[in-house]
Amino acid sequence: MVKTGSYPRVDVTDAAASLVRDLTVQHGPLMFHQSGGCCDGSSPMCFPVGMFLTGPSDVLLGALDVGLDAPVEVFMSESQFEYWKYTHLTIDVVPGRGAGFSVEGPTGMRFLIRSRMLNDAELEYFGLTSSST
């Protein structure tokens, strides 16, 4: 399990949070999954809760506070997480055609991931550095 709390692994922009709120009105509670696929599969996919079933090979990155009653959970495939474990991810939204199965598709907007390297404090918090260095 990935530590969450003081240093979140995932965040959301105001624009993406606004779209998630709008989509929640239409589809009910939502969740994100970031797979390791190519093309659209490399974008964060937004699904109604229960439509995409996560399994033991999925990592819970965190839960986004988008101003709803319940947070929106964000998952990533374990194999993909191995490549991204040193990064902080931010879900954003831009104009364009989204993935076919992601609920934002018909809106003319698409979710995407912006990333940055974890800073020293975050690396230590997530146990990704040796405290003896």
Image (cartoon, rainbow, N blue to C red):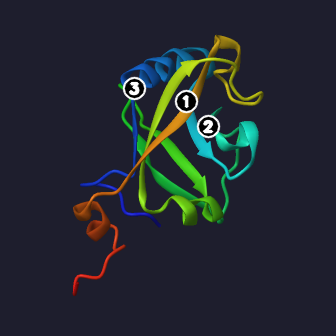
Who comes first in sequence, dot 1 or dot 2?
1
**The one of 129 and 56 positioned closer to us in this rendering:** 129
- Residue drawn at the location 67% of the way across and 59% of the way down: 55
- Residue drawn at the location 27% of the way across and 67% of the way down: 125
* Circle 2: residue type: Val
* Circle 1: residue type: Pro
Distance between mark 2 and mark 3 Cα atoms: 14 Å
Who comes first in sequence, dot 1 or dot 3?
1
Who comes first in sequence, dot 2 or dot 3?
2
Q: Tell me residue 82's x, y (percent).
A: 56, 66
In the structure shown, which secondary structural element does the residue marked by tag 1 occupy? loop
Q: Specify the label residue 29 is tagged with.
A: 1
- Side of 13 where 49 appears, left or right: right
Q: Which residue is disc 2 drawn over?
A: 49
Q: Tell me residue 89's x, y (percent).
A: 44, 45
Quarter containing the C terminus: bottom left
Disc 1, disc 2: CB below 8 Å? yes
**The one of 50 and 57 positioned closer to us in this rendering:** 57
Disc 2, disc 3: CB below 8 Å? no
Q: Which residue is disc 3 drawn over?
A: 68
